[in-house]
Amino acid sequence: MKEIRLGVNIDHVATLRNARGGIHPDPIRAAKIVEVAGADGITVHLREDRRHIRDEDVKNIIKETILPVNLELAGNQQMIEIACALEPNAVCIVPENRQEVTTEGGLSVFGQETRLAPFIEKLKRKKIKVSLFIDPKVQEIEAAVNIGADIVEFHTGRYCDAEEHNKEKELDFLVQAANVANNYGIEVHAGHGLNFNNVVQIAKIKQIKELNIGHFIIGEAIFLGLKTTIQEMRRIISHSRKTALLREIN
Ligand code: PXP
């Protein structure tokens, strides 16, 4: 069972910067710390309303970091053209609603195949890997496979927000879905709402190759510092993965 890659979402460094309209704190400085802390990638969400990360930030982060950049954005013509011009390592297409505080659920791929397929084709022609942020449902996985996505990222929000008596059920949806996706040969990522506690069970799902974590890491960095928080997240994820592996061997 391999290590899981950890992508750190630094949107909220920009949220804080924008609150004062100045240049501090600088997302590039955060990206450099993510690099030094040993994470595997940087994730940024370029929202249509540009409430945190802006086009110039994405351009500079891609230029200044050696880590692969995963660019999240809405699946529409204008955003896909911006992504093609920015040329990140990967694009994750997410559902977007201007009124939402954060990405509230997965993308409806099923039923939107004809609209989304040309975007995927366009990005792949630019050698950009394409991920679709979906709920852990078979119908969505199959639709993602059918239109040629490279990756599905499962929205873990329902698991993270579930009351204790529902946690097991939500975890099971993720486990089953990861299995289905893996059998189709599509790479599996996961993220949303993960923290030091709830990441433990998610890290044990062996088909998941990458976790993208933002809000908790940036929030916890206020208390522990960004580098220490990322290192601690990495330690928890690795420990959980290794424990699961040992259990499988024995
Ligand atoms: N993955 C995707 C596709 C997202 O949209 C987000 C939130 O922007 C995350 C991961 C990270 O979620 P969180 O900030 O809750 O850790």
Image (tube, rainbow, N blue to C red):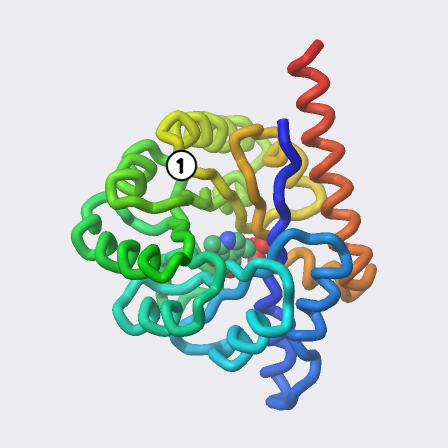
The answer to whether residue 197 is above or below residue 27 is: above
* Quadrant for the C terminus in the image: top right
Q: Residues within 10 Å of mark 1 (few under 14, many from 20)?
A: many
* Quadrant for the N terminus in the image: top right
Q: Relative to residue 159, is residue 38 drawn left or right?
A: right
Give the x, y percent position of residue 135. 39, 42
Q: Residue at 52% of width from left, 76% of height from top? A: 59
What type is the residue that disc 1 sits on?
Ile
The answer to whether residue 219 is above or below residue 162 is: below
Q: Which residue is mark 1?
A: 186
Residue 98 appears in the picture as rendered: no
Label 1 within 8 A of ligand 1 by Cβ: no
Give the tally of numbered discs. Answer: 1
Give the x, y percent position of residue 7. 60, 53
The residue nearer to you, when weighing 84 against 229, is 84
The answer to whether residue 61 is above or below residue 68 is: below
The residue nearer to you, when weighing 92 against 185, is 185
Give the x, y percent position of residue 221. 76, 62
Q: Residue at 78% of width from left, 48% of height from top? A: 232
Helix, strand or loop at disc 1?
loop
The answer to whether residue 125 is above or below residue 27 is: above
Q: Residue at 38% of width from left, 49% of height from top? A: 132
Quadrant of the image occupied by residue 119:
bottom left
Residue 57 appears in the picture as rendered: yes
Q: Residue at 77% of width from left, 42% of height from top? A: 235
Seen as rendered, the residue at the extreme left is 114
